[in-house]
Amino acid sequence: MGGAVPKQYLPLAGRTVVEWSLAPFLTRGDIAGVVVALSPDDVTFATLPGARHEKIRTTIGGTQRADSVMSGLTALAARDDDWVLVHDAARPCLHADDLARLIDSLSADEVGGLLANPVSDTLKRADASQRVESTVPRDQIWRALTPQIFRYAPLMAALTQARVAGVVVTDEASAIEHAGHRPRLVAGRTDNIKITVPEDLAIAETILKSRGAF
């Protein structure tokens, strides 16, 4: 976003982005707790009203996403077969129905999976000069979203294996894939957007308002 305030702390419809992102998880009785990975110098999260929720604890994150996720997993008092969900702090528009669908769809799955959208746009592969090299077939291409859900021990093992191998994983599913497993895709809503550029805040506010969220 290029601003002085980290995007997860930007104001959005009376809360911060991260408070909206946490909200769907805090209202479910089957979610035992939530761990928020923070920068070592973070002094903002503890000042938020939502940070005082009884289910929330914090941990120090790392330089890469996978490092922060591993720190969060370590902070959990989890059993090997417990399900864990990983969600982006900058996705404030997760709908409760999507979260329920993800959990219900994968409760008996051997691997786990993630919310995702089938790609509807035409995709182009560019060369070094930013000219079109080819058109990418889109019929089996999905856009990965969060949350993503996997068992505690297999996810920790997959992230550790990727780290040892020097493989940079951009989401938890790619770590599971690197470990030789095939996560399941669960179709989610297209309005589960990630705050990336300034105009996304206005879009997110419109989405939340349309749901009567405030």
Image: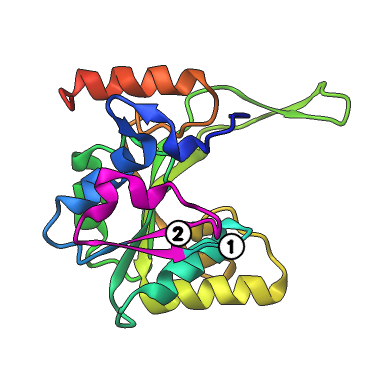
Find the magenta span and give its range. 35-59
Q: Position of residue 188 (x, y in %)?
A: 32, 38
Res 185 seen here: no
- Name the amino acid type tagged 1: Gly
Relative depth, front residue between 85 and 136: 85
Mark 2 surroundings: few (<14), some (14-19) or many (≥20) residues within 10 A = many
Which residue is at a point 48% across and 70% down the rendered structure image? 71
Residue closest to the far right = 129
Query: Looking at the picture, which amino acid does disc 2 mark?
Result: Ala
Position above or below: 156 against 55: below
The reply to whether the magenta stretch includes residue 27 is no
Comes first in the chain, label 2 or label 1 = 2
Disc 2 target residue: 37
The residue pinned by badge 1 equals 62
Please give the name of the residue rendered at 39% of the width and 19% of the height, measured from the top-left corner.
203
Foreground of the two, 53 or 190: 53
Task: Give the percent coordinates (x, y) of residue 86.
Answer: 39, 57
Q: Residue at x 58, y 22 (%)?
A: 122
